[in-house]
Image (cartoon, rainbow, N blue to C red):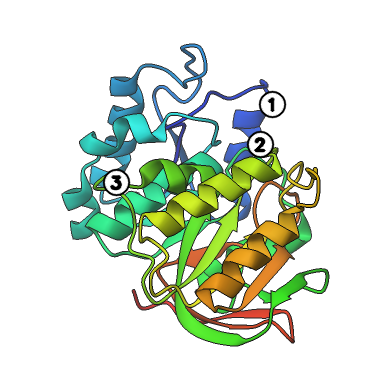
């Protein structure tokens, strides 16, 4: 069974929950919908205690093999202290989602050291590309990535390390909290959307100044829609490439990760290799 939960923002349209259920069935799972999956309190999918109860009920149920978040939005950080990490450690299960779900990925990495899956939320229409990567990551646990033909090489090189990261804004917000993941020896995979270049610059600087990037092996950034507006003399690639050069690490931008229809599912906590010249990211081991 797969639990469909909304731990952050609310569903937007009436067709999203039925589509999520059909997505689960098409992958061979029996969907179990959280009791408050359709709730709404402003920009949250219901009250904090209700969202928390839905996710903990799924984590404690031995019949549930995966927790697939219905959407991102905002709100996951608000319930991190109450997550039953012990239950997840006792009975590991796939945690799936992206964007604001990064907060849950980060906390699980920190508390449980389990592999989680940065990939499409359950409500989305899965393209053939996204479905194929999702199945390879979550179900088959084989290489779910490959060659990103449209990626931009901002600093050349090769690297091997744990796949870490997620949404840039969420990671920056987690700095200084007990839920910030350890990025040491990691290939940092980032994504975001609609952030002006100066804000991307500021969030990357926050990660750097906090020491979070010390020992980072490489940086990969997804297709950051709406992040390419320029200020005089500064572009998104300038900012990201500058950081990569300062850290002395390989860097690719524009890989199929994040708020796009065709996206890779990234097994966070697994081991991978990056070759910027080939524009290739390879998942080599799912051992956390």
Q: Is the residue 155 above or below the residue 56 in the image?
A: below
Relative to the observer, which residue lies in front, 93 or 152? 152
> CB under 8 Å between callouts 2 and 1?
yes
Q: What residue is pinned by disc 3? A: 176
SS state under label 3: loop
Disc 2 crowd rating (10 Å Cα; few below 14, some 14-19, many 20+) is some
The mark lying in front, picked from 3 and 1, is 3
Q: Is the residue 146 above or below the residue 77 in the image?
A: below
The mark lying in front, picked from 2 and 3, is 3
At horizontal 24% and vertical 47% (from top left) the residue drawn is 178
At horizontal 54% and vertical 36% (from top left) the residue drawn is 72
Relative to the observer, which residue lies in front, 45 or 34? 45
In this view, the residue farthest toward the top is 42
Relative to the observer, which residue lies in front, 64 or 77? 77
Residue 218: give x, y in percent of width and height.
Answer: 54, 75
Determine if residue 105 is in view. yes
Residue 94: give x, y in percent of width and height.
Answer: 41, 57
Residue 79: give x, y in percent of width and height.
Answer: 30, 32
Disc 3 crowd rating (10 Å Cα; few below 14, some 14-19, many 20+) is few
At horizontal 45% and vertical 49% (from top left) the residue drawn is 206
Q: What residue is pinned by disc 1? A: 15
Left or right of 126 on screen, residue 17: left
Disc 1 crowd rating (10 Å Cα; few below 14, some 14-19, many 20+) is few
Label 2 vs label 1: CA separation? 6 Å
Q: Is the residue 137 above or below the residue 3 in the image?
A: below
> CB under 8 Å between callouts 3 and 1?
no
Report the disc number at residue 19. Answer: 2
Label 3 vs label 1: CA separation? 39 Å
Label 2 vs label 3: CA separation? 38 Å
Residue 68: give x, y in percent of width and height.
Answer: 48, 45
Q: Earlier in the sequence, mark 2 or mark 3?
A: 2
SS state under label 1: loop
């Amino acid at each position: 069974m797969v639990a469909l939960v909304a731990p952050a923002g609310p569903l937007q349209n009436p067709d999203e929950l039925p589509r999520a259920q059909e997505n689960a069935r098409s992958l061979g799972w029996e969907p179990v919908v959280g009791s408050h999956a359709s709730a709404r309190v402003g920009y949250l999918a219901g009250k904090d205690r209700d969202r928390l109860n839905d996710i903990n009920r799924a984590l404690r149920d031995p019949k549930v093999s995966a927790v697939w978040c219905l959407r991102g939005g905002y709100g996951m950080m608000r319930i991190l202290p109450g997550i039953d990490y012990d239950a997840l450690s006792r009975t590991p299960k796939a945690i799936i989602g992206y964007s604001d779900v990064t907060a849950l990925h980060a906390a699980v990495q920190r508390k449980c050291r389990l592999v989680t899956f940065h990939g499409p939320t359950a409500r989305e229409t899965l393209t053939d590309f996204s479905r194929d990567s999702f199945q390879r990551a979550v179900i088959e646990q084989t290489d779910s990535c490959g060659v990103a033909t449209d990626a931009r090489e901002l600093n050349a090189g090769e690297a091997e390390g744990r796949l870490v990261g997620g949404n840039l804004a969420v990671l920056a917000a987690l700095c200084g909290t007990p839920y910030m993941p350890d990025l040491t020896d990691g290939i940092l995979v980032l994504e975001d959307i609609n952030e002006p270049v100066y804000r991307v610059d500021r969030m990357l600087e926050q990660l750097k100044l906090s020491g979070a990037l010390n020992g980072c092996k490489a940086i990969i950034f997804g297709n950051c829609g709406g992040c390419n507006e320029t200020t005089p003399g500064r572009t998104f690639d300038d900012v990201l490439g500058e950081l990569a050069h300062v850290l002395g690490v390989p860097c690719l931008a524009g890989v199929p990760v994040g708020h796009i229809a065709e996206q890779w599912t990234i097994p966070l906590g697994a081991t991978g290799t990056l070759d910027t010249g080939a524009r290739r990211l390879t998942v080599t081991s799912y051992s956390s």
